[in-house]
Amino acid sequence: MKTYKTLLLVALTSGLFLNSCQVTSQSFPFKLPKEKPNQPLSRAMERNYDNYMAPRPEDNELYTQFKYTEIKGLDYSNHDGTISRRDPSKVIFENGKYYVWYTHRQTETPPKGAKLSTETIPSADWDLSEIWYATSTDGFTWEEQGVAIPRPPKPNLGHRSVSTADILKWEGKYYMYYQGFSEASGLRGDDCPVLMSYSDSPDGPWTATNEIVIPNGPKDTWDQYSIHDPYPLVYKGKIYLYYKSDFNEKPNLVRMQGLATAESPFGPFTKNPLNPVLTSGHETTLFPFKEGIAALTIRDGNEHNTIQFSKDGINFEIASLVELMPAAAGPYIPDAFTDTKDGRGITWGISHFTSYNGWATNHAILARFDCDLSLDVNDPAM
Ligand code: AAL
């Protein structure tokens, strides 16, 4: 009996027990394989290989963490809300320096509610604004150069506010696309079309066409009230201009992004029949990447906090999930306008931070962000 018990104990602690812990051919390997292993996988593991560019975020070219640095040289009047700078454009490098344009407001602080706005009291942080610009030699210290595009006199389009600009360089000339408000934002919604001004030099002077360049959609379509955040790139020999619209009305507001293309900066712009092409995000931030276009998809929608990629500029897929994304980011994109077939990515730019006062934004500041979304980490031009 004693012998039997001893045998049993030995069997349990050695062979039998070891067998139950043994690594079988089905066990997942210790080193995370780069390619999907040919073995049964859980749904999460399947997704980890099928849905992302690499099974480990750190190996994914479109994964990054974002770092922020306060920029020097811009006065905010002690942050009392009377001076605001927001929605920066892309950063471009011309004449030996970097340029950025942005919405500049210098008024009383916006009250809570658009109905309290007057001819001099803004309804929102981007109401009663102008487009200003600053230049820098290092991207950290900026010198404000003043107004680039003022509010035109009544009854011109945009007489209430011009905001949220972005730049295009096309055949050696400069084109600025921006939101033009002819009534205070927020009275119905944040309603506006896109206007355009052009110049021979990034220092201006800018000539406004005084026409709508990207019209709102027809009644009962997703972009019938607003075209926001116009964002031009050069791709496939054309101007690819991405934009956001607010639709579905409060309190069920939806924000998605669409694409309009043109062969001339003056238009006509043709809206893509598959619009919206991005179901999520807020302000537009996209850049050429390899043969396609990548998008920072920030804040709203099911797929917020992602970086997405499309091989054709139209059909985007999630490439990575990220955090602390730069709001309204305007990256420095060396190949934004070169019609590249092999986009190199981005490493830095200017974004904004906002402070809130009820529904309206009290004021916003510009900041620098840095990231690692470049295929040329050692390229001094980046
Ligand atoms: C921003 C942008 C547009 C909106 C408002 C000012 O963040 O999406 O520019 O109109 O908010």
Image (cartoon, rainbow, N blue to C red):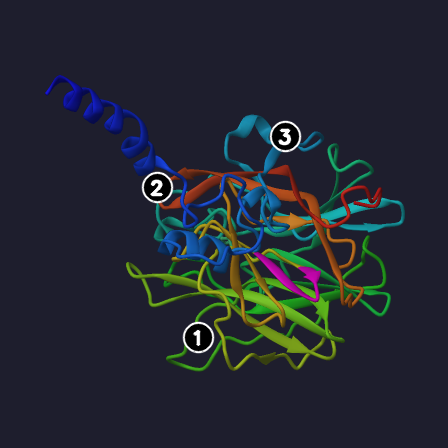
- Left or right: where 307 falls relative to 195: left
- Of badges 3 and 2, nearer the viewer stands 3
Residue shown at 74% from the left, 78% from the top = 264
Q: Magenta stretch: dominant SS?
A: strand
- Alpha-carbon span between mark 3 and mark 1: 38 Å
Residue shown at 45% from the left, 72% from the top = 223
- Of badges 3 and 1, nearer the viewer stands 3
Three-letter residue code for mark 1 = Gln
- Mark found first going from the N terminus, 3 or 1: 3
Report the front residue among 347 and 167: 347
User: Residue 240 in the image: x percent, y percent?
Assistant: 66, 71
- Mark found first going from the N terminus, 2 or 1: 1
- Alpha-carbon span between mark 2 and mark 1: 27 Å
Residue 108: within the magenta? no
Could you tell me if residue 34 is visible in this image?
yes
User: Residue 165 in the image: x percent, y percent?
Assistant: 64, 57
Q: Residue furthest top?
A: 2
- Left or right: where 361 falls relative to 56: left
Could you say whether the residue bearing mark 3 is in a helix, strand or loop?
strand
Could you say whether the residue bearing mark 1 is in a helix, strand or loop?
loop
Report the front residue among 93 and 184: 93
> Residues in magenta?
288-295
Three-letter residue code for mark 2 = Gly
Residue shown at 31% from the left, 27% from the top = 14
Per the rendering, the mark at residue 248 is none
- Alpha-carbon span between mark 3 and mark 2: 25 Å
Per the rendering, the mark at residue 70 is 3
Q: Identify residue for label 1.
A: 224
User: Residue 258 in the image: x percent, y percent?
Assistant: 52, 70
Q: Quadrant of the C terminus?
A: top right
Per the rendering, the mark at residue 358 is 2
Q: Residues within 10 Å of mark 2 (few under 14, many from 20)?
A: few
